[in-house]
Amino acid sequence: MLISCPLCGPRDATEFRYVDERRQRPDPEQASPQQWRDYLYVRANPSGPARELWLHRSGCRQYLFVDRHTLTNEVQTAALARTEGTR
Amino acid sequence: MATASHQRQRSRRRPGARFSAFGLLRQGLTRADWPRVWRHRDLAGSYDAVIVGGGVHGLATAYYLAKNHGMHNIAVLEKSYLGSGGSGRNTAIIRSNYLTPEGVRFYDRSVRLYEELACDLNFNVMFSQRGHLTLAHNDSSLRTMRWRAEVNSLEGVDSRVIDATEVARLVPQLDMSEHAHHPILGGLYHPPGGIIRHDAVVWGYARAADALGVHLHQGTELTGIDVVDGAVRGVQTNRGTISTPVVVNCTAGWASVIADMAGVGLPITTFPLQAAVTEPVRPFLDTVVVSGSLHVYVSQTARGELVFGAAVDPFPSYSMRGSLQFTESVAGHVLELMPALSQLRMLRQWAGLCDMTPDFSPVMGITPVDGFYVDVGWGTYGFKAAPVAGETMAELIATGKTPDMIAGFDLARFADGRLVGERGAAAVGH
Ligand SMILES: Cc1cc2nc3c(=O)[nH]c(=O)nc-3n(C[C@H](O)[C@H](O)[C@H](O)COP(=O)(O)OP(=O)(O)OC[C@H]3O[C@@H](n4cnc5c(N)ncnc54)[C@H](O)[C@@H]3O)c2cc1C
Ligand SMILES: [Zn+2]
């Protein structure tokens, strides 16, 4: 499995660390304990297209937004998380 | 074309007929075909309960529903063939030396049911209680092992910490030198632990459930769940719709996909777990050997193959492809433990899907949708739990009351912040 890092080019997946699904963090001012715990524990865990956060650990050490198909492990896109902002 | 006498023999030995030594001899002498182990059924329009997933958990739940509670109008739906999921891909290690008292009691009940299972199902499941040994490579793991051994003994489970000399006596092939990268200081020894013939457990439960009237539908994929006013009304499948008030999710790695159909969110992420076997050699390894620090475990099957297992893959996936990284790392680590195996050849490797939860404990019981039950979150350790999980889930479904033994494994614990923390099941522990 290859991930095309925008800074380093195509690299083997072993260079990266999977961090989590890409999700919106609830607003600390508004969120109920229930919403926080959902955010902490519940996952979409899709079988198919997934939007994820990865770290290029043995490369540029940047966080990346990665779009990947979880049945085939095919990576569609990888973009720098910091330029895209938190979405 | 079958001859008349052939047909007579077939019909005489119907599915569910008892196996016996005499039957084996007669079958061997007449060389007739063995009867099918379970029947092919037409999909009925309605069932009292529909169990999704034809692995060991779904089949055990169906069996105990029929046997202990007299519910016979039930179906098990399996999208592929029975045992095609984790139940046919695991390394079949059974043990009960967990860390929390709740965990120990739960898995101890399972081991006891496994001890009686061959008799109960009239099917040889080849449960071999050859002992389970977890190695300690540093002081902190020895400390945790003493803790585990104390909890185990209090619950009446045979489990004790042994020193390096006893480890060497149990498994002479281990590299016990002080210069090893991960020297062996001792271990947690659990004599009733062992391995089982996992396919036989699946087939045995399937055959016994079929004999009690349960419909087993292979090649039948659940595609939707009808929920009306917060309650289950029926399901859709690739073979048609079924009306039912009860749906039980026993799909392990696919648990989130099924729960999604009912609109229920789960604290589960699906990771592949890989294993490998070598060519068969003469029996030399009695004990199941586990090393948490080296992320490997080794056992020898009745056929003589060495079975290697490891930790889950580093990222979630529904793909069941093996990887070269796994083969390389497992071989390297096994050789660190037992250098003498360097001449052995690996025969094959494979992967299965594991439904991992944040607290290494299952998610069992009711959900916010009435009639939608879950028996999931079995991660890398669920085969050993199948009998007790089936027994308790059946009790819940039939009586509407959650048995004490599984009360702490409820889905609501995540919203309430009552996680279990069963580190005794962690990563390569099995
Ligand atoms: C390599 C490996 C080693 C392991 N080693 C051990 C071990 O040593 N000891 C231990 O206790 N556990 C072990 N495990 C874990 C154990 O295998 C599982 O926890 C257990 O088998 C789960 O059983 P199950 O019946 O819940 O799920 P499964 O056996 O996975 O069955 C789920 C079934 O659901 C079916 N399904 C999915 N979606 C649908 C649908 N839409 N419609 C119909 N059917 C569907 C699948 O086809 C599958 O057959 C291991 C797992 C792996 C992968
Ligand atoms: Zn990079």
Image: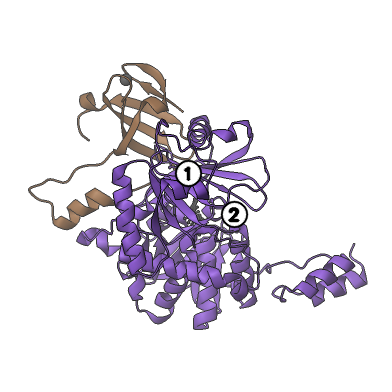
Q: Which is more N-terminal, label 2 or label 1?
A: 2
Which of the pair B78/B287 is nearer the observer? Answer: B287
Percent x, y of residue A56: 31, 25
The answer to whether one can see residue B409 in this image is: no
Residue B146 lies left or right of residue B92; in this view the side is left
Which chain is the one coloured brown?
A
The answer to whether one can see residue B172 in this image is: yes
Circle 1 chain:
B
Task: Specify the quadrant of the image occupied by residue B339.
Answer: top right
Nearer the viewer's eye, disc 1 or disc 2? 1
Please tell me in which quarter of the rendered image ligand 2 is found.
top left
Percent x, y of residue A47: 44, 45
Which of the pair B342/A47 is nearer the observer? Answer: B342
- Pointer 2: what residue? B80
The answer for how far apart the CA atoms under marks 1 and 2 are is 19 Å
- Pointer 1: what residue? B273
